[in-house]
Image: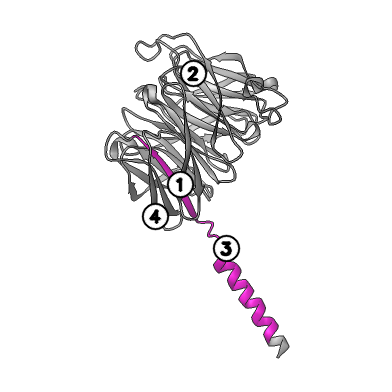
Amino acid sequence: MKRIFFFLSIMLSHFCMQACSPDSSTLTMLVGTYTGGSSVGVYTFRINTVDLTYEPLSQVEIDNPSYLTVSPDHKFVYAVSESGNRSSISAFTFNKDAGTLRFLNNKQIEAGPCYILYHEHTQSVVTANYGSGTVSIVQIAADGSLADQQISFTYEGQSIVPRRQTSPHLHCIAATPDNKAIFATDLGTDKIHKIDIAPSQGQSKDINLIFTKSSSFEMEPGSGPRHIIFNKKHTFAYLINELSGMVSVLSLGADNNLALKQSILADTLLAGGSADIHLSPDEKFLYASTRLKGDGIVIFSVNGDGTLKRIGYHATGRHPRNFAITPDGNVMLVACKDSGMIQIFNINKQTGLLTDSGKTIPVDQPVCIRFVQ
């Protein structure tokens, strides 16, 4: 009898572990939007990456949350409001199980933020401000809210493309893998600016003592640097240039110096609207979105030396801005701003190529996608 009870206990325990453990195929998704139409702000969904079904969870009203970042512990979400001279950052607590956001506070920053990074080592959020050509850094308080202390770095200069490059336009923030610096891409001056981080990072609460404006790396005139990412080995950075439509492969050296290794064309129509860039989780493939003409996703394979080979392209809805790849590498979701939808693609992990699933999620003017597992 005891032996039967023992086996029943084992079976029940196994069943409970399977039934009660989180489903790895289910993700919580946050979507940032522009609110000039019917959208009200940030939306959350539950999405299944196997059958591609989704469930709307919640929404929170905020003006033009064009970019979002989630704290590493998934307890807080920070959103920019890209709203001219009324631009700000808002902080929210986040219940990832229910997909709900609760407003904490907000702080006004420089005009036109279009990217936000949570920098864990300095307990701050950093924004690239397109409209004002600045970088804003705001300290995070112990309760996850935004503290009063903030600093701003202002840049100067221009480049050769009329109307697009008459002044600095900061577009992306990326922390170097060693956390000794952050890079800020500047579409308006064709530069990647470096901001150094003091060795005492995380110990000092005075962000004026943590961050220091440093050097800049010059890219090809008229290129328009937009988004930059790093590989996991911390050997290369990959940059999408909005105006030239080129992807730049940059080696990452000592003291976080960059050196150009390869330039390869993504936007063959030269429409001047390249937008986002991501590596597949296994880093065998790299994807870039292009807009304005021939809207779609360009696909590259990654060679052993970090260089790229163009292997494909897949059309999308209109104006594919940000896109995201699920952690398992099987699905890509593309925020098609002007089509009012998030388009869902299956990824062939052997070839890197995309297949349109035929499924979409209707959202007005989606421009940012974030996953929480």
Residue 172 lies, in percent from the top left, at: 49, 26
Q: Which residue is mark 2?
A: 134
Q: CA distance from mark 4 to mark 1?
A: 18 Å
User: Does residue 226 appear in the picture of this structure?
Assistant: no
Q: Decide: marks 4, 1 in contact (CB < 8 A)?
A: no
Q: CA distance from mark 4 to mark 2?
A: 38 Å
- In this rendering, the answer to whether 296 lies above or below 111 is below
Q: Which contiguous range is marked in magenta?
A: 5-34
Q: Which residue is mark 1?
A: 101
Residue 211 lies, in percent from the top left, at: 63, 21
- Tell me which numbered mark, 4 or 3, is placed earlier along the sequence: 3
Q: Which residue is mark 3?
A: 21
Binning the other alpha carbons within 10 Å of mark 3 as few (below 14), some (14 to 19) or many (20 upward) gives few
**Residue sitting at x 40%, y 35%:** 65
Residue type (three-letter) at the residue carrying disc 4:
Tyr
Binning the other alpha carbons within 10 Å of mark 2 as few (below 14), some (14 to 19) or many (20 upward) gives many
Residue type (three-letter) at the residue carrying disc 2:
Thr
Residue type (three-letter) at the residue carrying disc 1:
Leu
> Of 170 and 349, which appears nearest the observer?
170
Left or right position of 206 against 81: right
Question: Label 3's element?
Answer: loop
Question: Label 2's element?
Answer: strand
Q: Which residue is mark 4?
A: 54
User: Does residue 94 appear in the picture of this structure?
Assistant: yes
Q: Nearer the viewer, mark 2 or mark 3?
A: 2
Q: CA distance from mark 2 to mark 1?
A: 28 Å
